[in-house]
Image (tube, helix red, strand yellow):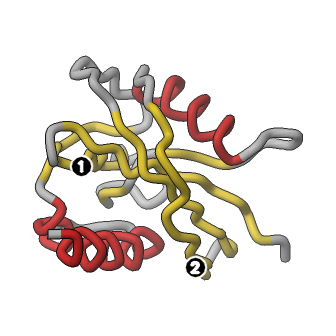
Amino acid sequence: MDIIKVVCGIIFKDDRVLICRRKPEKSLGGFWEFPGGKVEANETYEQCLIRELREELDLNVIIDRHFLNIVHHYERGTIELISFICESKESDIKLVDHDKIEWIPVGDLLDWNFAPADIPIARELIETYTNLK
């Protein structure tokens, strides 16, 4: 079975990071995640992330750098989650695939019920962020 490539944005604004809760009727409904989506054919990871964030949140971001890749095996298939550190100055967000968002301190990430593939990214982000201080 092929590995599905998925990108996500670790979006910072004023020292807080954006997390989104998937709608209950969606796959992994009720779990929190870093927003993003599946990479389409002939699309770079960065192009995909910008497109997905506009489609799902009506949010424009500046991609700063690649952060971490995680391969996770779900019952329905395997994904490679490719994360990028981003920044946004916007505050108006439109919810399409999510029913709630929060801007939270990085140190609080593991207090939320994250989708399994997002947990290692949250852990690494906490460790990286803590070491910068």
The spot of residue 45 in percent (x, y) is 68, 47
Say which amino acid is labelled 2: His
Give me the residue at 51% from left, 45% from top. 36
Give me the residue at 43% from left, 52% from top. 85
Give me the residue at 38% from left, 67% from top. 115
**Dot 2: element:** strand
Q: Which residue, given by chain and number where applicable, does mark 1 sit on?
A: 17
Q: In the rendered image, which quarter contains the C terminus?
A: bottom left
**Dot 1: element:** strand
Q: In the rendered image, which quarter contains the N terminus?
A: bottom right
Side (left or right) of 133 relative to 55 = left
Count of numbered marks: 2
Q: Is residue 122 or residue 25 the one in the foreground?
A: 122
The spot of residue 15 in percent (x, y) is 15, 47
Side (left or right) of 130 relative to 37 = left
Q: Residue furthest front?
A: 133
Q: Is residue 30 or residue 10 the one in the foreground?
A: 10
Q: Is residue 80 or residue 46 the one in the foreground?
A: 46
Side (left or right) of 16 relative to 36 = left
Q: Which residue, given by chain and number where applicable, does mark 2 sit on?
A: 72
How far apart are the alpha carbons under marks 1 and 2?
Answer: 22 Å
